[in-house]
Every structure is written in structure tokens, then in C-alpha cells.
Image (cartoon, grey):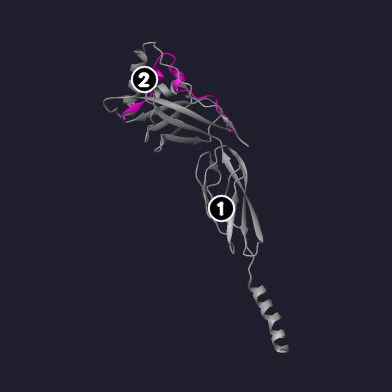
Amino acid sequence: MKRLLTILPILSLMVTSCYKEPFADAIIDPLPAYVDENITFTNLSTNAKHVEWDMDDGTITSAFSPTYAFDLPGIYNVMLTAFGDRGDISVAYFPVEVIGSLKVIVKEYYDEYVVPDARVRLYPSLFDWDNETNLVAEAYTNNAGEVVFANLANQRYYVDVFETWHDNYTLGTEEDGVQWIETPPLNPDYFYEFVAYVDVYDTPATKSATTTKSKKMMLKEKASGESRPARTTSTAVPKKGR
């Protein structure tokens, strides 16, 4: 009996020494990220029974390696908590910078359906929009008819949209048509949404830059002066960063 009592404390010590405490760690990509851009939080925690992410914007998730997008610019102090088998925890913090941006949503004017795979170009002035000079940025809309631009200057931009069956050239060259292509003055600390309305055509447009430039000039000369029904969603109120 004395021998058994001597062995039990040794076994208990061995079990205790084998236990490994949790350690919270992760890799986050991309950094910095744009507003509405998917960020991958790759969990590298060890000895964790489960984990919890606090995104510092009111969102908490227990997904092991979540993908997440922030809808406002700012610096978020994301907290990862790793929980061990014995209720002990390990906590790690990751600063995530999210950059303010301009989201352009392309919609057909009358039926308001979104237009995917549309070429969206930003120009610094109306003259440049007319003549297709001094291009600032170019990208294509996703399946939701959206494209995001970042790292823009604090100024207005003029939005050129082209897709095989759609463009915004008639809208932009009408009298007072600048309202349909001109963004508000952008501030890098804010997130903006701009709805770029387009018209649909019975025959496909030509992708030639020379042809589109000529089309704009022709439409401008033929502008009727008639105004279309007002839209209240052409620009959204900018959302301030954190």
C-alpha cells in the first residue's frame, strides 16, 4: 500500500507535465485591405479546443479560420482567443487597417438590374471623360455589378461605363447629364457608393476607344435637353471611418 501511494503522486505529476497550454496565433491577408474586400484570417493557434474572433466592429465568430470583410474604413484591433481543455485561454491582437474607397454599382437605368463584367473607368475631369484622356483607374464589375476603387485623391471623378450591350454615354452627354457620371468629392477617410446608371441597346456597342469617344461627341451634339426622372440613389451618403 505504501508503494502505491508513492506511485500515484508521480503519475499525477507526469499527466500534469504533459498538458500543453493554448497559444493564439494567426496570419491575416491582405493587409491593408479595402472596404468590402474579403480578408482571410488563417488560424495558427496550437493546443486550442476552440477559438473565438472579435472583429472590433461588433462581430464575433467561432469559425476557426474565417473570411471577413469590413464595411467601413479604419483600424480594427481584432482579438483572437484560443481556449484550452482546462478552461485556460490565450489572447492575441492583430491591428487590421481598412482603407476608404469608392464602390461603383452599375445598374440599367429603367429596370435597375445590375450589370456584371462592365468596364468602369475613372477620369479626373469632364474634359477627360469626353476625350478619354488621363485615365486614373480601370476595373470590371463582379457578378453583383460592383467594383471597388481605393487610393483615390480628394476630388471628384467622372465615371465611364461600357459593356457589350450597355454604356452610360447617352446619360452622360444629355443636358445636365454630368449628374449621372460625376462622383462627390472623395475623402480617403470615407467610404462612398456611386450608382452608375447605363442604357441598354438592341445591338452591341463597339469596344474601340476611338469609336466610344466619337459616340460621346455625337451624342453630346444631339442632346435633346430633356431630363430623365430623378433618381435618389445615384450617390449614397459617405460613411465615416473609425
Please state which of residues 15 and 156 is positioned toward the viewer in this rendering: 15
Please state which of residues 100 and 144 is positioned toward the viewer in this rendering: 144
Query: Where in the figure is residue 7, as x and y percent of width and height?
Result: 69, 84
Residue farthest left in this picture: 203
Which residue is found at the position 55% from the left and 41% from the top? Answer: 70
Q: With 107 as the anchor, is 46 left or right in this view?
A: right
Query: Where in the figure is residue 190, as x and y percent of width and height?
Result: 58, 32
Query: Where in the figure is residue 49, as x and y percent of width and height?
Result: 58, 62
Which residue is found at the position 43% from the left and 17% from the top? Answer: 177
Which residue is found at the position 61% from the left and 35% from the top? Answer: 241
Q: The N terminus lies in which quarter of the figure? A: bottom right
Please name the residue that numbered disc 2 is placed on.
170
Please state which of residues 76 and 150 is positioned toward the viewer in this rendering: 76
Q: With 58 as the anchor, is 234 left or right in this view?
A: left
Q: Which one is earlier in the sequence, the residue at label 2 or at label 1?
A: 1
Q: The C terminus lies in which quarter of the figure? A: top right
Please state which of residues 61 and 105 is positioned toward the viewer in this rendering: 61
State yes or no: discs 2 and 1 in contact (Cβ < 8 Å): no
CA–CA distance in space, label 2 to label 1: 50 Å
The answer to whether one can see residue 133 in this image is no
Q: Where does the magenta region start and end?
A: 164-189
For label 1, the SS is: loop
Could you say which disc has been placed on residue 62 in the image? Answer: 1
- Is 185 colored magenta in this rendering? yes
Specify the amino acid type for callout 2.
Thr
The answer to whether one can see residue 42 in this image is yes
Which residue is found at the position 40% from the left and 28% from the top? Answer: 107
For label 2, the SS is: helix
Specify the amino acid type for callout 1.
Ser
- Is 184 colored magenta in this rendering? yes
Could you say which disc has been placed on residue 107 in the image? Answer: none
Label 2: how many Cα within 10 Å (few below 14, some 14–19, many 20+): some
